[in-house]
Amino acid sequence: MIDPRSVIDPAARIAENVRIGPYAVIGADVEIGSGSRVGPHVVINGPARIGADNTIYQFASIGDTPQDKKYSNEPTLLVIGNRNVIREYVTINRGTVQDEGITRVGDDNWIMAYAHIAHDCRVGNHTVFANGATLGGHVRVDDYATLGGFTLVHQRCLIGSYAFSAYGSGIHKDIPPYVLVSGSPAHPHGLNKEGLRRHGFSNKAQQDLQKAYRYIYREGLPLGKAIVKLRELSAECREVDILLDFLQQQTRGIIR
């Protein structure tokens, strides 16, 4: 299951049923879990921990050094979970000691060709990165978020759960959960209604989230006063509570 034309460091830890294609290069201190497939010409450098049942397509570069001039060859880490699809020419870099030293990618993510996940990013579960989507360093992308093709995310931004960016979006501030944005610089354009529908949100939850969106974006309220209204609404809607928690964590300001 390992092509003899691949180059694998003896110190790499490869589960028995991993498939590795020709001319792949696997460095020392790389761990790849069972059922994963590594395509031809993939390069994986460590330290990197890659879980089970991942598929990494040809020419991807995984776990290489961060693109940060402050990096001085410290032993930082990349951690990737399970069942991710990582397509052609994707680049995912390790962390830096200026953060916790770890770049993290969760489970069940769909990362399309030419996407880039920079150092110290934290990607949740079930996200979608369309072709060319790019994260600057220290970005957090929460569960079920979708980044359209060639979306550019400035460093240290937060992207909330179920958020959606249209193609070519330039994101320079945080995007709250459930919100759809487009443009460069990106602006809000309502809720990600199609995403909410596809993920089985109840009619009541969608109605409550619409109220929450109105408080934040339609009534001209300062964010602090909008948060007061969201607290009242969150008592009866768990989905609003997720939005409220995000707004209390954000540091760069939200897209408005």
Image (cartoon, grey):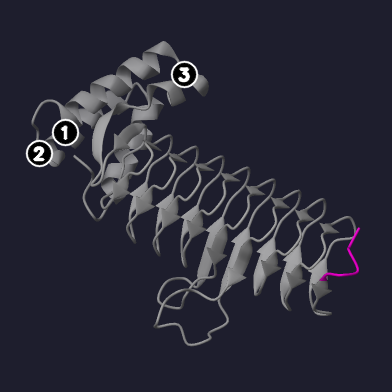
Q: Earlier in the sequence, mark 3 or mark 1?
A: 3
- Which residues are the magenta region? 1-6
Residue under label 1: 226
**Image spot of residue 104 (x, y percent):** 54, 59
How many angstroms separate mark 3 from mark 1 (CA)? 25 Å
Image quadrant where residue 247 sits: top left
Q: Nearer the viewer, residue 168 or 217?
A: 168
Outermost residue, top direction?
A: 203
Q: Is residue 242 above or below residue 198?
A: below
How many angstroms separate mark 3 from mark 2 (CA)? 29 Å
How many angstroms separate mark 1 from mark 2 (CA)? 6 Å
Residue under label 3: 197
Label 1 SS: helix
The amino acid type found where label 1 is placed reads Ala
The amino acid type found where label 2 is placed reads Pro
Residue under label 2: 222
Q: Is residue 187 above or below residue 28?
A: above
Left or right? Give the position of 197 relative to 231.
right
Q: Residue at x 42, y 57 (%)?
A: 135
Front position among marks 3 and 2: 3
Q: Are marks 1 and 2 in contact (CB under 8 Å)?
A: yes
- Magenta-drawn stretch, dominant element (helix, strand or loop): loop
Q: Nearer the viewer, residue 115 or 232?
A: 115
Q: Residue at x 68, y 65 (%)?
A: 49
**Image spot of residue 76 (x, y percent):** 55, 76
Number of marks in picture: 3
State which quarter of the image contains the N terminus.
bottom right
State which quarter of the image contains the C terminus.
top left
